[in-house]
Image (cartoon, helix red, strand yellow):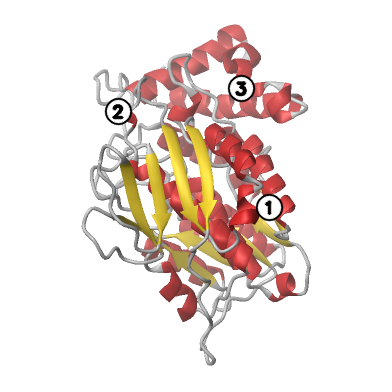
Amino acid sequence: MRVICRQNPAPLARTDGVSFSLFAAPEQQGVGRVGATIPRELRRVGAYPSTLAWDFLALSLSVAAADSGCLRSQSPDGWTRHIQLEVAVREPEVWNARARSLDTALRFLTGDIWELTFVPGGMAPPRVRRYTRKRLDGDCACLLSGGVDSLVGAIDAVALGNRPVLVSQTSQGDAERQRRFAKRLGENISHLQLNHDASPPGEAERSQRSRSIVFIAYGVLASSVLPLYRRGEVVELLIPENGFISLNIPLTPFRLGTLSTRTTHPLFIRQMQNILDALGLNVRLSNPYQFKTKGEMLDECQDQSVLRELAFHSTSCGRFMRFGYQHCGRCVPCLVRRSAFLKWGNGDGTDYRYHDLSIEDSQHRDFDDVRSAVFAALSVEQLGVEDWAGDTLNQVRLGDPVPYTDLAERGMDELRTFLDDVGAI
């Protein structure tokens, strides 16, 4: 499908593709929107990003728009889409030189075939007002989603003496939580909240596998306005997520890898770092927890007092909005969360819709994610972690597979212990 992203484009016939107004509300019917509120928000906080960082955000928002506007159900196999994306940027020649590398990274991230083309006419970065009450400041940047992993990452960064700019994608039910976390970590901690608000003119695709490139782009943009960056120094962008989830190992042979998110998979992070380096964007992507399970992250958090205060207010559920902003307790992210809290040993004050997974019905023990987790735990017990994980731990993608294999085994141990504890096995 053809997708066009630029400021106020003309609508396309649905059979021809879909167009999105980038960084501005659409002026015509039949046009989607993405990032319309972002320029205003950046002006409000006095953030004037570099042109390359701004173009990277334009690209990332356009990817999110295309992901939302192209229905997987209309693809030949019901999943893999062929997306021809045209993005208006300030420096198209720079981006066209990296288009094929970006195509490859996006194909790994979303499982689709991408063809990126960059054209002139992109909106200029927002200009800073002469007098701005509050500006972003810090010595690094850290993504803060409202989940427990990013909470641990932010707590650790502050406890270790850093002053991170916290960067968030707001979503319904999370914005206030993010603000609460940021404020608790320090009154002088800068916090940037943005919303891509990708909205196609027709039905929206729900799978949304591209969101991590938007989060990274927010972090790169925030990094590019810091004094460190302006002085030519490299700024660290922390992307905190437990390594077990980041490996994206299918629980069963029937659950394809891209049916789960590859948000922080080490291969994708490496691909994005190579692209940033080639562009001369002095930002270093870092996941300090690449070789930690979620339970280990909780155990080793540098400020246990703050963590105990905030951890149960974090979100993990893949169906949080669907259940009225309540954790379901049975999806894979919830199962990993519950396993981690059990290992941590400080109780679990989270309110789960489906708490008792020993109940023998389709809503509890026989729910697909629970059954898949049980299958995976038993497979590891019978076959070993390497046979269960299969090609996902291959050396070409990861380099030395040994630390990743050890990580996968510890992650499955946490999950198995929890499933035993609640009577799901």
Please state which amino acid type lies under the numbered disc 1: Leu
| Coordinates of residue 65 in the picture (x, y in percent) | 39, 49
Q: Are marks 1 and 2 in contact (CB under 8 Å)?
A: no
Q: Which residue is mark 3?
A: 392
- Above or below for 337 versus 57: above
Please state which amino acid type lies under the numbered disc 3: Thr
* In front of the other: 25 or 411: 25
| Coordinates of residue 104 in the picture (x, y in percent) | 60, 35
Q: Is residue 125 visible?
A: yes
| Quadrant of the snapshot with the C terminus | top left
Hey, which residue is sitting farthest bottom in the picture?
131
Please state which amino acid type lies under the numbered disc 2: Ser
- Which numbered disc, 1 or 2, marks the residue that appears first in the sequence? 2
Give the label on residue 208, or none: none
Left or right of 143 on screen, residue 12: left
Left or right of 256 on screen, residue 383: right
| Quadrant of the snapshot with the N terminus | top left
Give the label on residue 276, or none: 1
Q: Which residue is mark 2?
A: 73
| Coordinates of residue 286 in the picture (x, y in percent) | 68, 50
What residue is rendered at 46% in x and 66% in y? 193
Secondary element at tag 1 = helix
